Amino acid sequence: MSEKENGSGAHYAVHWQDEDNINPPAEFIGQANMTDPGVFDRFSLDKFPECFKEFADLLDWDQYWHTTLDTSDAPCWNWFVGGKLNASYNCVDRHLAKYKNKTAIHFVPEPEDEPVVHMTYQELYQRVNETAAVLRDFCGLKAGDRVTLHLPMTPELPITMLACARLGIIHSQVFAGFSGQACGERIWDSESRVLITIDGYYRNGKLLDHKSIGDVAVEVALKEGQEVDKVLVWQRYPGKYASASPMVEGRDYFVNDLLKQYVRVRVDPVPMPAEGILFLMYTSGSTGRPKGVQHSIGGYLAYVAWMSKVIQDIHPEDVYWCMADIGWITGHSFIVYGPLAIAASSVIYEGLPTYPDAGRVWRIAEELDVNIFHTSPTLIRGLRKAGPDEPAKYNYKFKHMTTVGEPIEPEVWKWYYKVVGKGKAAIVDTWWQTETGGFLCSTIPALSPMKAGSAGPGVPGIHPIILDNDGNEIPAGAGKAGNICIKNPWPGLMQTIWKDRDRYVATYFERYCKDPNSKDWRDWPYMAGDAAVMAADGYVRILGRIDDVINVAGHRLGTKEIESAALTVEEVAEAAVIAAKDEIKGVVPDLYVSLKPGYEASQELAAKISGAVSTVVGKIARPRQVFIVPDMPKTRSGKIMRRILASISNRADVGDVTSLSNPEIVEQIRKQVQD
């Protein structure tokens, strides 16, 4: 089957109805950072690329740039060339004159009997300096070296990142939930000589042994040919060792002990070229060499600072909580670098959102008086399932809420708006990717109406276009989906894939490149790999990855549409659609759902859900079967593993499930479906 038949998700009919516009509250508009409708004119394509000076001017520069955009190595774009700056200085030092006594990080431990740690900018400054001294003087690290971090959601993670950035060291943070194998492969690919980890951290009421995973990672890296000289181990409780894994003499060192030699040491921030590398962020592929997304210092930091100020609407006096993990790009951009660059108070929560119960998130929000809340549809669905009525029990007030990471179904969006936001918060439904650094599509919260399930138009400076398989533009309002692309480069875009330029070009640019020898940015539209439809008003609705399309007897169906239809049924908490093999139609949709608390599975309910899909999307989308399961197989970050469900439906090997947060559920579902 050719790519045109099955691989792109382009140009299939969309059955979703457009939702009503909801205007932002007047109270929000009155205090917003951006209320100037002329912002889109300032960032029109005829002002490109000089318009992005507005982003860079949010930062302090050691040396101003001479070239805003260098296209000489297209499509590896370089921004603010000739400029020099330091990311750590911009996130910490420059705020001391005005905000040294203000909280930079509110750290909320998972155990509720442990006090919240409120770390001021002055304290953060001291800890970043002392940690940088350890990296420089004890480890011998310098600008351009790579260091792998395998740290959980504790303050030591942003401290270590900022210490690396202070010296120009390239950090590669691996999500703490990843296995030793995955971490070791990333150590190898990045050629790190130092691994920084922690002895243990809390998850779902348990103090997990984390250091032992680092030991496995070091062994895996060595087998691949990369030797780790030093393993630095933070302690969750300084002076107490929380791991059963022995420390290896001459290789493993407690950071807490090393820091005693560097008390009050100050490390001057190293002025770095704007086009230098700030960090590597590996996207989690199940096969092949890890894909190290490489982000710059100047362009990336300018981009996330502007997005934090304008789209997130963060003011220094706000309490801002992004409930992502710093192990992913959302946490890098919108817990650490973006918010701290504009002097925010950023909340970091160590543990599980539903520990010890479904009210935990709302208790934290009430206690800290959080007024900006940022999370993913995955988590929103999880909170809705675990405690749909919990938010009403707590006295918090959000002015602004974000959803990020994947498309959100209209029914889930409405619960988020009405129940979590109590109908009084402005919501931005942002679309972007690891590769893009920051938001691509979103409403500006005080300027544009909200629309359930729709990410909104391109943010200022981003010019999206929907293309079919042949490169023809699908007009806004045509009711047809295609491949969403961005016409122009932007400062937050990755520079390349680490050590693999060819893969970078092939993955993101080759499909629609007009001339592979061109140095003109107009010839290199960025292909995101997502299917989308653009409404007549320019609002974009993301339908999922271009391979999240089921071709049923020649009809191309977006899985997100079917899942959204299932979620219109009151009893349904989560839905996942997979392609099941069928002798006659080729593939048909199988629909897996889990229910909200208090509801029971029945044949009548399964029929009701199937009927909802037929009504909302059409009879062609009716699932072959609706399986009501006790829970979905999920990763540690809460994503539903549709691959496992597809293996069960198709009676294939489910593979290794040990890294799931709930591996026991897989066998329960298999018996239900196959027996």
Image (tube, rainbow, N blue to C red):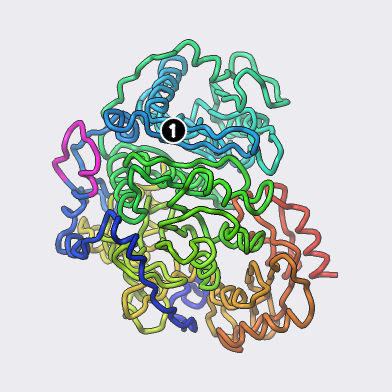
User: Farthest residue toward the top?
Assistant: 261
Q: Residue at x 52, y 75 (%)?
A: 6
Q: Position of residue 104 (x, y in %)?
A: 41, 35
Q: Residue at x 25, y 49 (%)?
A: 73
Q: Residue at x 50, y 43 (%)?
A: 368
How would you classify the magenta stretch by its main secondary structure? loop
Query: In the image, is residue 481 above or below residue 61?
Result: below
- Residue 359 or residue 138, whichever sits in front: 359
| Residue 333 within the segment the image draws in magenta | no
The quadrant in which residue 513 appears is bottom left
Which span of residues is magenta-colored?
A: 55-67
Question: Can residue 526 be seen in the rendering of this structure?
Answer: no
- Residue 497 or residue 274, whichever sits in front: 274
| Residue 64 within the segment the image draws in magenta | yes
Q: Position of residue 294 (x, y in %)?
A: 39, 44
Residue pointed to by mark 1: 161
Q: Residue at x 55, y 46 (%)?
A: 364
Q: Residues within 10 Å of mark 1 (few under 14, many from 20)?
A: many
Q: Specify the amino acid type for callout 1.
A: Met
The quadrant in which residue 114 appears is top right
Q: Position of residue 543 (x, y in %)?
A: 48, 71
Query: In the image, is residue 631 above or below residue 309?
Result: below
Question: Can residue 511 be seen in the rendering of this structure?
Answer: yes
